[in-house]
Amino acid sequence: LNAVIIDEWHELLGSKRGIQTELGLSRLRGLRPHLSVWGISATIGNLDEAMDVLLGPEQDSAPDIIKANIQKNIQAESILPDKMENFPWHGHLGLKLLPKILPIIDESRSTLIFTNTRAQSEIWFQNLLETRPDLAGAIAIHHGSLDRKVRDWVEASLHEGILKAVVCTSSLDLGVDFSPVETVIQIGSPKGVARFMQRAGRSGHQPGSTSKIYFVPTHALELVEAAALKSAINSEEMESREPILKPYDVLIQYLVTLAVSDGFYPNEVYAEIKKTFAYQTLSEKEWNEILQFITQGGKSLARYNEYSKVEIEEDGLYKVNSRKLAQRHRMSIGTIASDAMLRVKYMSGKSLGVVEEWFIAQLNT
């Protein structure tokens, strides 16, 4: 192994999946000291910091940032109601503007309609079919809850230019190049300039082509956001992705994963993880407490045998010897929550907490 290339690095940066990537790279560098690491991203504001997080604080040589000398043209338009006084001040569906997007779909070879939740995508898909029954068979839906075979069929049909439109979620944000797609429609707030531009780039996916995206506000206040998005695109401003520092839960899971495999020696692994951006300031005291947690359950859980997962062998190797514990760990490994979560905030911006997407979908507005 000579090189590792990580595509869409901005999607991992600032998430616990990104921390797992950092730890995985630290392990690979321990095995291959001269490993070459590349990160690819099209939409990120803090490029220098993103590079530092990917490569770690200790670098053998000065890294380089390579920028493509390509000016991507993005044409962003907002769909406005005929009468503003009849437009709602709250809501999250935006169905009042559905008649206005039908001509856009008709005029385009193929259109991606992005929504923010799976429930919203289902509602839009059904309403499109009810409003225009003639589109049956020419439009489809794509989100993470659908069977893999269904999603593969939708993606293949987009490539072949069979589908007139696809209602989708973030499941089609990344890693797709559908040449027939001429237009993108964003329903409601995209929750960020980078995501808006990422989705816009799904259209006009050829050098020199113009990406065309329409913003459909779901309530009157989102018209302000639409203006802000246009301003940010014109001035080439993009938000930064802030890295996460020292999440103990990810490190604990990583160590147990090593122990489930061939085991690990603490001194060797500690030296490796100190070379990651996330854990470069991890103290020996913190490290010893983490080791105590995986072997004894820490101070609070020491009396519960199920938290004493890792055993210390005579030569100092940390190893999981229980097949039952090893199987349970493998079945639950990862940092992606099983339920999609949405953050709830006060009007002041202070965070209240998170709730499941299905709960939000059931609320009446």
Image (tube, grey):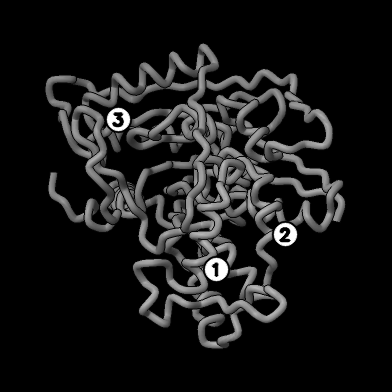
**What type is the residue that disc 1 sits on?**
Lys
**Which residue is more in the foreground, 45 or 55?**
55
Q: Which residue bears the numbered disc 1?
A: 149
Residue corresponding to mark 3: 217
Please state the horizontal and vertical placement of residue 267, each as a whole percent of the image. 69, 59
- The tag earlier along the polypeptide, 3 or 1, is 1
Q: Quadrant of the C terminus?
A: top left
- Nearest the camera: 91 or 100? 91
Say what secondary structure mark 3 lies in: loop
Residue at disc 1, secondary structure: helix
Q: Is residue 71 above or below residue 176?
A: above
**Res. 268 mark:** 2
Q: Is residue 133 visible?
A: no
Q: Is residue 311 left or right of residue 34?
A: left
The crowd level at tag 2 (other Cα within 10 Å; few <14, some 14-19, many 20+) is: few
The image position of residue 6, as x and y in percent, is: 69, 46
Residue 33 placement (x, y as % from top left):
84, 49
Looking at the picture, tell me which residue is in the foreground, 322 or 342.
322
Say which label, 3 or 2, has the lower sequence index: 3
Residue at 47 percent across and 45 percent down: it is 165
